[in-house]
Amino acid sequence: MEYFAASNKLSKILNDPNLMLKQFGLKRSRKIMERLNEFDSAKNLSFIPSDPPPRCHRLHGSLEGKFAVDVSRNFRLIFEGYDKFDLLSYDKEEIVSIRIIEISDYH
């Protein structure tokens, strides 16, 4: 499954280990890399477990229609899913690419 960042700034951070380390610290950077590697190896979003550690789940409220995976106790990698036609999708089996919106504590 492919992934891309919603902004140039986030894209630079995700593609540069030194920037990621500076932005998120050692532990979070390692977890972010684990999540990105899981996305790389998954055929579609249904391959990412709903159980911890990734705990892929759909969001509600102000983040309705988006998904998240755990990075640390409070931090989440927040993203939108797209199907093979590059249309926004909410069906985990149809989602073959994701757009990472942010990595933050939305609680």
Image (spheres, helix red, strand yellow):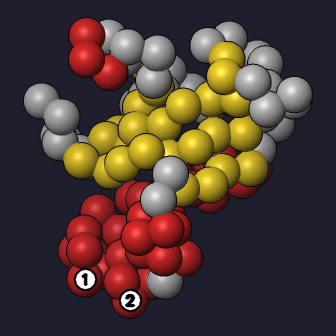
Q: CA distance from mark 2 to mark 1?
A: 6 Å
Which of the pair 77/88 is nearer the observer? 88
Q: Quadrant of the N terminus?
A: top right
Q: Amino acid at mark 2?
A: Asn
Asked if disc 2 and disc 1 are in contact, CB closer than 8 Å, the reply is yes
Mark 2 burial class by Cα count in 10 Å: few <14, some 14-19, many 20+: few
* Amino acid type of the residue tagged 1 in the rendering: Lys
Mark 1 surroundings within 10 Å by alpha-carbon count, few (fewer than 14), some (14 through 19), many (20 or more): few
Rendered location of residue 39, percent (x, y): 65, 47
Residue position marked by numbered label 2 in the rendering: 18
Residue 22 numbered tag: 1
Looking at the image, is 49 positioned above or below residue 21?
A: above
The percent position of residue 38, horizontal first and vertical second, equals 62, 49
- Residue located at (32% from left, 50% from top): 103
Task: Give the residue displayed 17% in from the left and 42% down from the top.
Answer: 105
Asked whether residue 53 appears in the rendered view, the answer is no
Residue 63 placement: quadrant: top left
Q: Is residue 6 visible?
A: yes
- Which quadrant of the rendered structure holds the C terminus? top left
Badge 1 marks a residue whose secondary structure is helix
Going 58% across and 43% down the picture, which residue do you hit? 99
Left or right of 26? Residue 19 is right
Q: Give the image quarter of residue 62.
A: top left
| Left or right: where 38 falls relative to 26 | right
